[in-house]
Image (tube, helix red, strand yellow):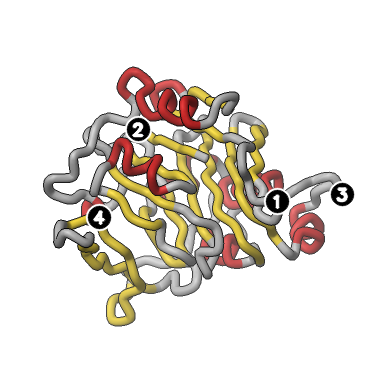
Amino acid sequence: MLAVFDKSVAKGPEALQSPQSNSVSALKDGFLAQHFSSVYPGSVIVNLGTSGTLAYSLHKQNPLLPRLFAVVDDIFCLFQGHIQNVAHLKQQYGLNKTANEVIIVIEAYRTLRDRGPYPAAQVVRDFQGKFTFVLFDSGSKTAFISSDADGSVPFFWGTDADGNLVLSDETEIVAKSCGKSSAPFPKGCFFSTSGGLSSFEHPLNEMKAVPRVDSSGEMCGATFKVDADAKKETTGMPRVGSAANWSNNI
């Protein structure tokens, strides 16, 4: 799968950017979406206008970690993996028996956006299983991205030449536009448009960037780890009643 977000929607951490990255623009002339289509003929490309692009293919997918896509009320979501406590989450969010994982993620996000009874970290932590997802709310121009605590599903991110955020389950796809300004997405973390990167296992702590070095000794993005010594100034998410408020307060 592939997601490219304009930097106005999702700007990656500066530590992801490497000198001499050899990156190019992922969005200009639909470069990365076209490359994805050439690698996976028959793939589905979703144009998000000036906000970016989503794409997915069912080619060579792991049957134990399937890719799912859904759109509900202008909320787009790509999901890969399997959630074990689906029955409990359906009941928690008042969903019918036919709801699958991607619908659960969308409903969980909508609950956060519109009512916010729990911190975002708690909502993601409630997903038990192997997963990664990329969600985009076109109404509030908000991105919400996460990977499970064990990093069970391969997931990578990077920053292209224009500062746009690129995400994929294939490192080669990310590197095509981001070059060396890329790295594995931090396991046990979530990323949002206004809140940046946080650990859902340790939401009170800041994240610390650790530079990556490739086999030739050159900088290659960064990994991110929980900083046990640094606490965030603010915690949780205020209970709010609109998408606009939610996107400003996550």
Whole-angstrom CA distance, mark 3 to mark 1, is 21 Å
Residue 3 % position (x, y): 46, 37
Instruction: Give 90 or 140, whichever is nearer the viewer.
Output: 90
Sort mark 1 into few (<14), some (14-19) or many (20+) by Cα contacts within 10 Å: few
Sort mark 3 into few (<14), some (14-19) or many (20+) by Cα contacts within 10 Å: few
Indicate the amino acid at tag 2. Asp
Q: Is residue 160 above or below residue 119?
A: above
> Which of label 3 and label 4 is nearer to you?
4
The disc placed on residue 221 is: 4
Tell which circle, 2 or 3, labels the residue nearer the N-terminal end: 2
User: What residue is pinned by disc 2?
Assistant: 6
Tell which circle, 1 or 4, labels the residue nearer the N-terminal end: 1
Dot 2 falls on a residue whose secondary structure is loop
User: What residue is pinned by disc 1?
Assistant: 63
Tell which circle, 2 or 1, labels the residue nearer the N-terminal end: 2
User: Residue at coordinates 80% horizontally, 48% vertically from top-left?
Assistant: 95
User: Residue at coordinates 42% horizontally, 23% vertically from top-left?
Assistant: 34
Whole-angstrom CA distance, mark 2 to mark 3, is 36 Å
Q: Is residue 18 left or right of residue 109?
A: left
> Which of label 1 and label 4 is nearer to you?
1
